[in-house]
């Protein structure tokens, strides 16, 4: 039986593998992730998974780094907007419908739990959070250049806490108005 990934470029096959890891993590946590389960979910051979990732730890670490890249992309400025509007747009992105699904929020919970499961995962999460906060602080300073770096960093940390709380409580079924107020609170923290 031919695998679905035949003929795909190597990068696309790796993306399918990481998509599979993230799906399995969201559905069943770290215990649902095995090299064989990932290969099956991705529609690739077990040999291909083993070729790209030496073991389950390397596989999960790569998935964590992919999520980090997605988080940083949330803050990518739109060059056509003024700095304050760039910041507002970036802060609103965390409440986009794609991030408020049960599957995505379940994945977030699993990713946070991974930090307690393995020292390397904890370091990846810590480094990712630092980079996210630094990029957010940079956007804040661009919008409010009179702020010191330390003040912008404090504001970024406060916003990060509110955003993570928004995601956690969204699982409980918060209404859209509550989510919108949380986003506005982040804007207030950043700009006032």
Image: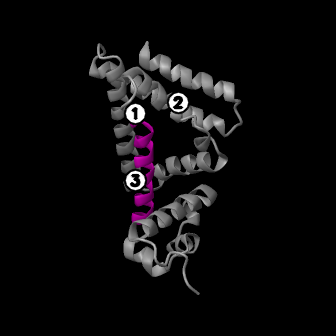
What's the residue at 52%, 49% (across, down)? 113
Residue at the (57%, 47%) spot, across then down: 109
Is residue 190 shown to the viewer in this render? yes
Give x and y (percent) for residue 95: 57, 34
Quadrant of the frame with the C terminus = top left
Q: Residues within 10 Å of mark 1 (few under 14, many from 20)?
A: few
Whole-number angstrom distance, CA of label 2 to CA of label 3 = 23 Å
Q: Is residue 53 visible?
A: no
- Label 1: element kind: loop
Q: Indicate which disc, 2 or 3, sits on the residue closer to the N terminus.
A: 3
Residue in the image at 70% along x and 37% along y: 172
Q: Is residue 42 above or below residue 85?
A: below
Q: How is the image coloured?
A: one colour
The span from disc 1 to disc 2 (Cα, nearest Å) is: 13 Å
Check disc 3 and report its element: helix, strand or loop.
helix
Q: Are marks 2 and 3 in contact (CB under 8 Å)?
A: no
> Disc 2 marks which residue?
92
Q: Nearer the viewer, mark 1 or mark 2?
A: 1
Count the marks. Answer: 3
* Residue at screen point 36% across, 32% down: 79
Which image quadrant for residue 173? top right
Could you tell me how far apart the alpha carbons at marks 3 and 1 are, in whole angstroms?
23 Å
The part of the chain drawn in magenta is 57-78
Left or right, residue 10 beside residue 113: left
Q: At which x and y percent is residue 126?
A: 38, 43
Q: Secondary structure at mark 2?
A: helix
Q: Position of residue 14 (x, y in %)?
A: 43, 67
Q: Residues within 10 Å of mark 2 (few under 14, many from 20)?
A: some
Q: Is residue 118 above or below residue 41?
A: above
Residue at mark 1? 78
């Amino acid at each position: 039986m031919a695998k679905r990934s035949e003929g795909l470029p190597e990068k696309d096959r790796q993306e399918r593998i990481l998509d599979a890891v993230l799906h399995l993590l969201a559905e069943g946590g770290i215990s649902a992730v095995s090299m064989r389960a990932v290969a099956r979910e991705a529609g690739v051979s077990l040999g291909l998974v083993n070729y790209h990732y030496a073991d389950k730890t390397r596989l999960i670490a790569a998935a964590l780094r992919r999520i980090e890249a997605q988080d940083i992309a949330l803050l990518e400025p739109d060059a056509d907007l003024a700095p304050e509007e760039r910041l507002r747009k970036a802060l609103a992105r965390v409440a986009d419908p794609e991030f408020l699904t049960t599957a995505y929020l379940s994945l977030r919970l699993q990713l946070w739990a991974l930090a307690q499961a393995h020292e390397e995962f904890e370091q990846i999460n810590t480094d990712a959070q630092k980079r996210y906060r630094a990029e957010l602080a940079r956007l804040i300073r661009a919008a409010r250049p009179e702020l010191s770096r330390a003040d912008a960093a404090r504001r970024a940390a406060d916003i990060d806490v509110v955003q993570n709380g928004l995601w956690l409580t969204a699982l409980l079924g918060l209404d859209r108005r509550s989510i919108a107020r949380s986003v506005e609170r982040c804007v207030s923290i950043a700009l006032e």
